[in-house]
Image: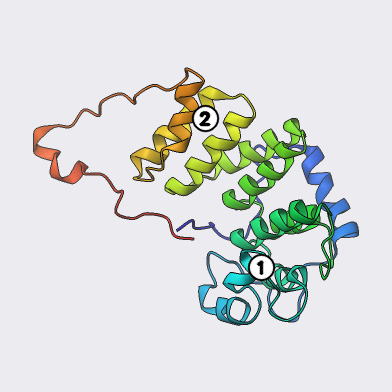
Amino acid sequence: MIKVKGNGLSIGMVSWAMLSGYAHAYDVCGSLQNAYGPFDYWVDKNMLGVVEDHHFTPEVESLVRGKSGYIGGDIDYTLRAFPNHPRALLAMVRLGEKIRSERPGGANYSVRCYLDRAIRFRPNDSMARMIYSFYLVKRKKNAEALEHLEVATQHATESGNLHYNLGLVYIDLGKYDRALQHAQEAYRLGFNLPGLRAKLEKAGKWQDPPAAKTEPDKEQGAESAAGDLPQQ
């Protein structure tokens, strides 16, 4: 599981353009205040039942049909309660692409607004940053996507899932060295889907990681931490 450290804003590699964008996002995309929440997806798991039982159901997530009305309305309810809910963010992105609209029926904001709201809510959430960068790459906004990826990388945790997806986005941007770093880290953590390595091999950029040097008396303690896989 990805863990967000505290609620503070770490500027780090965030550009002034991105910071000024927060003020603009507030004007366009509304306040984060909500009757239920807002809650942190990675911290407030005990509060997820209300939205996932009554709004963000499997049929809503798979864009089959809405639970309480429009699919977009149910995802909107979820993201107003949990602005950084990663699967709901991805569902909203996919819904916009499916119906070719930046503001699906039932949604209070545009697709990009939900991504902006997630970042305003938790600026250091690496998964939200990665999803935002994925959205931007598909719209040829590569420079902006790279800024979000740099922040995501800065705050990346021991999540094979996250490193795997960061690698995929870096490949889309043609940043093969960075993609290789994240691929090797994802596989080290036990996230062994073959697609990322296959893409790097096709581009002639795959390299096996250096063999780890283990002292005999520390061999047992040096075993992989892959048993603690990230959960979504």
Q: Position of residue 70 (x, y in %)?
A: 77, 73
Q: Write down the quadrant of residue 147 in the picture.
A: top right
Q: Residue at x 67, y 40 (%)?
A: 148
Residue 142: x, y in percent? 73, 31
Where does residue 56 sit, x and y in percent of width and height?
63, 73
Label 2 residue SS: helix
Q: What residue type is labelled 1?
A: Val
Q: How many labels does the image show?
A: 2
Q: Outermost residue toward the right?
A: 27
Foreground pick, 152 / 192: 192
Q: Relative to residue 46, is residue 113 depicted above or below?
A: above
Tags 1 and 2 touching, CB below 8 Å: no
In this figure, which residue is indicated by the disc labeled 2?
179
Q: Name the residue under label 1.
A: 64
In the rendered view, tell whether residue 34 sits above or below residue 166. Answer: below
Residue at 63%, 77% (x, y): give it.
51
- Residue drawn 64% across and 63% down? 88
**Crowd around label 2: few <14 · some 14–19 · many ≥20 (10 Å):** many
Q: Judge the density around disc 1: few (<14), some (14-19), many (≥20) Cα neighbours within 10 Å.
A: few
